[in-house]
Image (cartoon, helix red, strand yellow):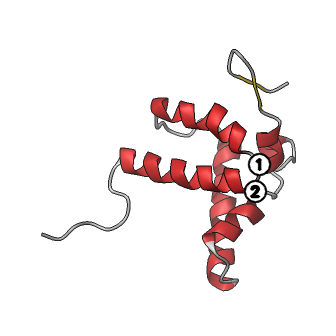
């Protein structure tokens, strides 16, 4: 029979995104944060509707920018990720996703933003 291409269910999506995030974060020099904070959390992921229009707007802007970089600039998805990770976001008080991620500090209780 014909097998569908791409991601066809939630578990496949989580598996691929976790793998990609792990590669990207390790290459950015933060393997410890991935192994300590993100990887353990992937077992309890839930999908929901958006709760914050600012975040939704930022994600839509990232999609727009990613399409331009991937198609018009012919950038690789990997390089596009690094570039987008340095874009300031209003929701992060004009910090960028990379800096916000680095502010997460693993502790005995979990993640701290202090």
Q: Tag 2: Cα neighbours inside 10 Å, few (<14), some, or many (≥20)?
A: some
User: With 67 as the anchor, is 28 left or right in this view?
Assistant: right
Q: What secondary structure is marked by label 1?
A: helix
Residue depicted at x 47% and y 53%: 16
Residue depicted at x 65% and y 54%: 59
Q: Which mark is residue 97?
A: 1
Q: Which mark is residue 9?
A: none
The relative height of residue 13 versus residue 62 in the rendered view (above or below) is: above
Q: Tag 1: Cα neighbours inside 10 Å, few (<14), some, or many (≥20)?
A: some
Asked whether 107 or 49 is in front, the reply is: 107
User: With 83 as the anchor, is 16 left or right in this view?
Assistant: left
Residue depicted at x 62% and y 63%: 63
Q: What secondary structure is marked by label 2?
A: loop
Residue depicted at x 75% and y 56%: 85
Q: N-terminal of the two: label 2 or label 1? A: 2
Q: Which mark is residue 85?
A: 2
Q: How many marks?
A: 2
Q: In 3D space, how far apart are the residues under numbered discs 2 and 1 (Cα atoms)?
A: 5 Å
Q: Residue most toward the left?
A: 1
Q: Quadrant of the N terminus?
A: bottom left
Asked whether 22 or 101 is in front, the reply is: 22
Where does the image place residue 105, in percent across and percent down from the top left?
A: 78, 29
Asked whether the residues under the numbered discs 2 and 1 touch, taking CB atoms below 8 Å apart as contact, a structural biologist would say yes
Where does the image place residue 25, in percent across and percent down from the top left?
A: 69, 50
Q: In which quarter of the image is the C terminus?
A: top right
Where does the image place residue 27, in percent across and percent down from the top left?
A: 71, 57
Where does the image place residue 79, in percent across and percent down from the top left?
A: 70, 70
């Amino acid at each position: 029979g014909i097998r569908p291409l791409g991601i066809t269910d939630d578990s496949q999506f989580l598996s691929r995104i976790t793998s990609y995030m792990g590669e990207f974060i390790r290459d950015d020099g933060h393997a410890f944060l991935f192994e300590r904070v993100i990887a353990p959390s992937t077992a309890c992921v839930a999908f929901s509707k958006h709760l914050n229009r600012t975040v939704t707007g930022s994600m839509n802007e990232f999609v727009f920018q990613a399409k331009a970089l991937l198609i018009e600039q012919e950038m690789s998805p990997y390089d596009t990720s690094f570039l987008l990770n340095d874009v300031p976001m209003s929701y992060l008080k004009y910090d960028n996703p990379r800096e916000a991620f680095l502010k997460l500090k693993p502790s005995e209780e979990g993640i701290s933003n202090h």
